[in-house]
Amino acid sequence: TEAEESPEPQWPEDELGRRTPRGTVAGFLSAVASKDYEEASAYFNLEQVNIDEEGADLAQILENFLNQRGQIIPYSWISTDPGGRTDDDLPPNLDRVGALTIAGENIDLYVEETKGPDGGPIWLFSSATIEKIDSLSHIEESELLADRILPTFLQENEWGGVPVGQWLIAVFLVVLAYLIAWSIIRLVRLLIPLIWPKAGTELTAGIIKAFALPVRLYLALWLFIALSREIGLSIILRQQFSGLTVIIGWLAFLILLWQLAVYVGRFSKHKMTLRGNVSGVSIVLFLQRAAKIAIIIFGIIVVLGVFGVDVTTGLAALGIGGLALALGAQKTIENFVGSVTVITDQPVRVGDFCKVGDIVGTVEKIGMRSTRIRTLDRTLVTIPNGKFSSENIENYAHRDKFWFHPLFGLRYETTPEQIRYLLVELRTVLFAHPMVSNDPARVRFVELGSDSINLEVFSYIIVSTFDEFLEVKEDLLLQMMDVIGESGTGFAFPSQTIYFGRDSGLSKEKSRHAEEKVREWRQKGELQLPQFDPDKVKEIENKTPYPPEGSSKRKDSGSEKLPGS
């Protein structure tokens, strides 16, 4: 059996706070601020090192080096784990916490893990770092600019271990850095359109405006850090500002994301409005709000992390809460995903006449949660978008032509010659009509039904609206009824009929006429079966007057002119 893992030992707090790398750095700077250099030397690993200076003297030398050309990385970047950082390329017992520039040489500052008297971990400035500082201790210190420009009374009075004059200089540098950054960005924004003409377009100008404030903050931050090091502000004061500089850096990044979200949302909303896509505007507004909420949550987490608050537990709780919320709002999320599908695929648009499942009507609104359809009964049906996107959607608004396919059932007394006559004449009606597509335009004898002989028409009417289709369909049916009547036959009745009296039967004269016509076609080789001759199609194409003669919609080109015209 596998041995049970032993729990990590819980060490008592170190009286100097040296259990973690951050505690060691903060404790050293606190001791320096109090001018207790003897205590500050307790944060050095002085065992097994060969140095000339005393520990207290080395602590003061390190302070002076840091004031001149040194820096400590922000506290939020220094590990608070007793085991140190594990995501760097350094050995597990070594962490980098700062750097010095002395006589043109760059020196990294490290803290290393050692064992305390109680066996627990104690982090100290590494022995290699201490030896390096000792070897450079002979270098003469140059007078700092801050010390040269400050009067004596502002240097003697201290606040938090830092001369009051340096606090005033820090405030002045903040204002100066921001004014310089503002001037530079203002000048760049004036020069960009002169160098790059496309910068004046709506898209580019909006992006440049979104970047202006974040870049200004980053530049001001960089200028403040650089100027404070050049002037020689105390490392204690600069470290007090380190957390603020990190927050401002993240704030600039979050402002950039915020302004880009606002600009992209405004630009997309404008484009959707121009296209008349009301539902698209709703989607854009929803995504914009979601992006802003995400930026705010991310900003809060970052700021809490900078102040040393452990956000891991909060993130875990947020994840569990988000999962519970997602399960509870499953239908809402499903409808939102359906809305995105409807907007992106666009199977229907507002104003389209369509069939969704068993519902037929006109789309009036496509919203974030549902779609509304006005039915033929003038009722309003609301369909959740999750269900709407999963239904079979038949859109009638985008068809290019209408299917015309009546089935004519003829009486069984109809002779084959009459059928041949009808096949030719009914096709002639299709070919001759200007609103009927010739490909295909067919009439076929399809079956001998239970109570009728069936002829099937298959063609397409070239119109754009349903009302126009009904008009043309009506005209074609009337013409075909005339042809069937002229053939001498008639429509079959789908029910049994008991006749009382004498049946006059079919017209012998019309039947004889149809048969003679077919015989004449045969003799001349002009029987257009089983297919029409293409030359014949061209001869009769568009010969039928439409709208029919006498219709109020017909406008004859040869109409009489008004008197006096």
Image (cartoon, helix red, strand yellow):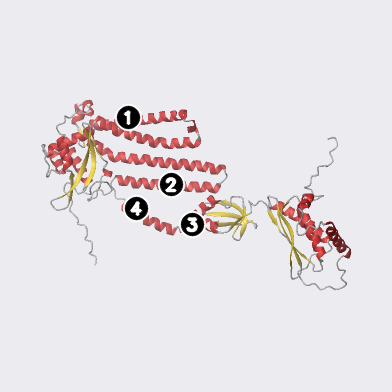
- How many neighbours does mark 3 have within 10 angstroms: few (below 14), some (14-19), or many (20 or more)? some
Amino acid at the residue labelled 4: Leu
Q: Which residue is mark 4?
A: 315
Q: Which residue is mark 2?
A: 291
Is residue 163 something that shows in the picture? no
The residues tagged by marks 1 and 3 sit, at their Cα atoms, a distance apart of 53 Å
Amino acid at the residue labelled 3: Glu
The residues tagged by marks 3 and 2 sit, at their Cα atoms, a distance apart of 19 Å
The residues tagged by marks 1 and 4 sit, at their Cα atoms, a distance apart of 39 Å
Residue shown at the point (50%, 56%) measured from the top left: 335
Q: Earlier in the sequence, mark 3 or mark 2?
A: 2
Amino acid at the residue labelled 2: Ala
Residue shown at the point (45%, 47%) measured from the top left: 289
Dot 4 falls on a residue whose secondary structure is helix
Q: Earlier in the sequence, mark 1 or mark 2?
A: 1
Is residue 382 something that shows in the picture? yes
Q: Which residue is mark 1?
A: 176
Residue 487 position within the rendered picture, expressed as x and y whole percent measured from the top left: 83, 61
Q: Which residue is mark 3?
A: 334
Name the quarter where the N terminus is drawn.
Answer: bottom left
Residue shown at the point (22%, 59%) measured from the top left: 7
Q: Earlier in the sequence, mark 4 or mark 2?
A: 2
The residues tagged by marks 1 and 2 sit, at their Cα atoms, a distance apart of 34 Å
Query: On the image, which quarter does residue 518 sit in?
Result: bottom right
Amino acid at the residue labelled 1: Leu
Q: Earlier in the sequence, mark 3 or mark 4?
A: 4
Where 53 sits versus 499, above or below?
A: above
- How many neighbours does mark 4 have within 10 angstroms: few (below 14), some (14-19), or many (20 or more)? few
Q: Is residue 71 left or right of residue 529?
A: left
Dot 1 falls on a residue whose secondary structure is helix
Where 7 sits versus 205, above or below?
A: below
